[in-house]
Amino acid sequence: MSATVIPSVGPSMAEHLHGLRGGARPDFQEPLPSPAQLQELFDHHRADVPLEDFLRRVCETRPTGTATATFPLMLDSGNFFQGVSMPRIMDSLIRDNGNSVLKRLLLEHAFGAIDKRRDGGLRILVRTSEAQQALNGEEVSIMGRKFRIGLESPLAQCFFLDVIGLTTAEEALNVFGSLASRGAKP
């Protein structure tokens, strides 16, 4: 009996584990300045020309600006991404995903910041409410596991503090005044 070999359609297991596909540069990385731009930056530094002028000229050549994203989503993954770098997570999200909604929104530059949450999972900010509605409930594959994107809880950014043991109103005012001076909202 001869064994039949089934040709692989997608990337190999090694490519999945390393997050690589044919050595292509991930789309989410900022382009590095050219050697000529670096030399110009060095020359401007020697001549005491402000760095802001150089940065303004470099940023003018970029096709899109920074996304102002205010519509939050959450990908609940527990502690799966603990110890995994954000570039690796992003590369896996972009490359290993067959989700057509996600691909369309990536092409439309609908995403803003994506960061890890302290309590586990990823927080995703998108630019429009339409993008938020389109991604809500979508299943995505990251590093070989499937996750579902959901709306972030309205209480996710709130912290509640129960202060007990204060005997006078003056002590309570001092505690709340200290918290307010550090940015806490009453």
Image (cartoon, rainbow, N blue to C red):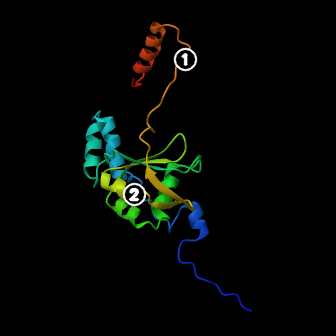
Q: Are marks 1 and 2 in contact (CB under 8 Å)?
A: no
Query: For the point 43% across and 46% down, which residue is it?
Result: 152
Rendering coords of residue 141 (x, y %)? 51, 61
In screen coordinates, is 128 left or right of 135? left
In screen coordinates, is 125 left or right of 6? left
Q: Which mark is residue 135?
A: 2
Disc 2 secondary structure class: helix
Q: Is residue 99 above or below residue 177?
A: below
User: What type is the residue that disc 1 sits on?
Assistant: Ile
Disc 1 secondary structure class: loop
In screen coordinates, is 37 left or right of 158? left
Of residues 167 and 74, which is closer to you in this image?
167
The quadrant in which the N terminus is found is bottom right
**Callout 2: 10 Å neighbours few (<14), some, many (20+)?**
many
Rendering coords of residue 62 (x, y %)? 29, 53
Rendering coords of residue 136 (x, y %)? 41, 56
Rendering coords of residue 156 (x, y %)? 46, 39
Of residues 49 and 153, which is closer to you in this image?
153
The quadrant in which the C terminus is found is top left
Q: Which residue is mark 1?
A: 164
Query: For the point 48% across and 61% down, which residue is it?
Result: 139
How many angstroms separate mark 1 from mark 2 (CA)? 42 Å
User: What type is the residue that disc 2 sits on?
Assistant: Leu
**Callout 1: 10 Å neighbours few (<14), some, many (20+)?**
few
